[in-house]
Image (cartoon, coloured by chain):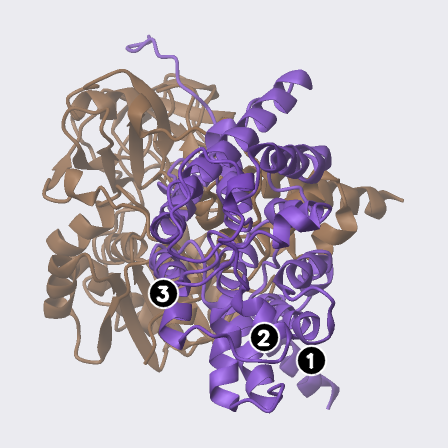
Chain colours: A brown, B purple
Amino acid sequence: MARSFFGGVHPKGYKELSSEAPIYPLHPKTVSIAMSQHIGRPCTPLVKVGDRVTIGQKIGDGQGLCVPVHASVSGTVVAVEMRPTPSGTNGMCVVIENDFRDILCPDLKKHESINELTAEELVAIIHEAGITGMGGAGFPTDVKLSSGLGKVDTVIVNGAECEPYITADDRLMRERPERILGGLRVIRKILQPERIAIGIEKNKPKAIEAVRAAADRDVEVLALRVRYPQGAEKQLIQAVTGRCVPPGGLPAAVGCAVFNVATCAAVYDAVYRGMPLVKRVLTVTGRAVTRPSNFSAPIGTLYADLIEAAGGFSCEPYKIFCGGPMMGIAQHTLDCGTIKGNNAVTCYSRKDNHEVDHPHCIRCGKCLDACPMHLMPLQLHKAREKSDLEALEKGNVMDCIECGSCAYGCPAGIPLVQSFRTAKKMLRDAKAKEGKK
Amino acid sequence: MKKYDLNLTISSSPHAHSSNTTRRIMLDVCIALLPALIAAIWFFGWRSLTLTLVSVLGCVVSEWAYRKLMKKDSTVGDLSAVVTGILIAFVCPVTLPFWTILIADVFAIVLVKQLFGGIGMNIVNPALAARAFLFSWPSLMSGNWVKAGTAVSAFSTPANLDGLTAATPMASLAAQTLPAESLLDLLLGKVGGSLGEVSAAALLLGGAYLVLRRVISLRIPLAYLLTVAALTVLFPQGGNDRLTWMLCQLLSGGLMLGAIFMATDYVTSPITHGGQIVYGIGCGVLTVAFRYFGSYPEGVTFAILIMNCCIGFFDKIGVPKRFGAVREKKKKGGEAA
């Protein structure tokens, strides 16, 4: 079977920087926990300055498409205010001063076995644990599960980790495969799929071995081609099942549900250990940090503390992203705290950056061959330059997953993804205006 | 409580970039043209080199001067003017006076390329347009073909060359007769003709390099050459042997240079895979038509120039199917039923 998708690029991995660094637990002095860490409505803070909180205590919750947020350390709330977040904007954050006593919230409830629990009860546990997709987008996992009930015949676990530099999932699969598979058992009980596949890129042989050893017999562990964006949801589904998610549709439309390996581990923690999503494995890497590392850090750990824990900067950092270099968000400050979907902090030195003086398109067509969504990036870019909304709509710019494959390979260095973000906003604004009329 | 005082750069993702640049691509094209240049020096002497260098200089200086004069950023560094310079020299006879090629350089760079907006914006291939323009001096362009093996010294003037001229294979083919040279000579380039066009073998070598470097795909050259091969084998002229006629057509004139280096010019060729194949076929059909029915013996230049003008149309052929769209249609059909 062809385990592949259309298009894509092959960026240099740089995974060797941190792939052999074992997961190291961090205990930061302060955490700044954002109230908006997922797709959907932000949480309303449930605590005020001066409150004492314990690990796993709910500190924010809301209505609608929203999952709660929990205290990741025990200690005292020192601020509830707007602070920088990794999304690049300021957001409401609860800042907790760690008392280093690691007191657990008394309300946390463990489940030895899931046999007595119904699918609905399990989904409720996952919701209360505040679990969101940990691969980056941050879609609430309970919504994904409940909307997939009865529709999903294939569950895919995403261990591709195709983004350069990042090794968090790799380390998690190597060191804690039993948690990933434990979480998968819960997901299986909820969705009852016919097929379960774990997709891991071939460049992580040790992770493949570890997961294979821990996996149940009927779980397929697939070695995927090393090609970016192998771990993009739609591309992974295409590679594993050959199915294409329709435009604007969810994976459930083709009978699939995709969960990141870290999400599975979080589900395990929530059900079997009673622990909500309060910490995650993330990679602090790049040539500008002294010791690229993998940390198990409480949610809300400040970027400055992460850099410090990785031995500080080895040279003047030029760019720092939340995530990897292909889809990561460039940061302007180190004062923001990590969020649930934050799998890496990558630090570029000036040398790592690529600049082009004259971005003139030469129509080489490389972007067309690279686009995994079958778009024509150069045509879209020209339409965006002319603000031709009709051409943008016809060219399906809204299908763009912003993976960056087109811009990565563009010999002229045209900022195509930036162009399409602008284009999408133009289209959305135009739609909103039309709606008002 | 700031631990770090940093001056961080903010930009949109992706922050990684491949090593591929316009300059690298153009450099690869220059490298791919080297074997043909060496063959030209071998067959026609050092004037091949001086003519090429003069042409490159002419193009680079025109580009630099125009951008400077118009107060635009300099684009000389992308090496595209160097490629144009080499290609213009390649489509000229080795005897062409230096002043003529300089006029062609200025024409190609300023009128064909820069006036349309510079690199990426021109409608037709500058080198081919320059060649078409050079036909204003027919005696210089097609009256002075020297025999292969005539070593023209680096700075000699064309007047000294009387008596060394020869009929080219293209002229024989236009007269519906097979060229006097053997097929091997045609392949290696031991024939009269434009200095960079004669050696099909050297051009194929350069083409293989470009394909291996993934600068070009096989779609356009293959569609082009196969079309010419198919048409000439089906309709041989002058009662000649089909296969020999076809091979002579493939190996003569500007076809190899045109199919590998001119028709594949990114700016003036379609971007969709389907469009590229149709474009290649179109180039082939027109080339054969011009060769068979035109008043000039050669048709590659005009064939490609005409096809250049139609790429807006070809870009609409073979537009990639929307991701997941087929399934959606099926579903809708299912619902309707």
The residue carrying pointer 1 sits among few (fewer than 14), some (14 to 19) or many (20 or more) residues within 10 Å by Cα, namely: few
Q: Which residue is mark 2?
A: B173
**Label 3: chain?**
B
- Which element is circle 2 on? helix
Q: CA distance from mark 2 to mark 1?
A: 58 Å
The mark that comes first in sequence, 2 or 3, is 2
Kind of residue at disc 1: Lys
Q: Is residue A175 above or below residue A344?
A: below
Residue B247: x, y in percent?
Answer: 47, 79
Please tell me how crowded label 3 is: few (under 14), some (14-19), or many (20+) other residues with Cα within 10 Å.
some
Quadrant where the image shows the N terminus of chain A: bottom left
Name the residue that disc number 1 marks. Answer: B332
Could you tell me if residue A88 is visible in this image? no
Front in this rendered view, residue A217 or B64: B64
- Dot 3 and dot 1 within a common chain: yes
- Measure the C-alpha gap from mark 2 to mark 3: 18 Å
| Label 1: chain letter | B
Q: Earlier in the sequence, mark 3 or mark 1?
A: 3
* Location of residue B149 in the rendering, given as x and y in whole percent from the top left corner: 37, 55
Residue A312 in the figure: left or right of residue B268: left
Mark nearest the camera among 3 and 1 is 3
Please name the amino acid that badge 3 sits on: Leu
Residue B188 - label: 3
x, y (%) of residue A239? 38, 70
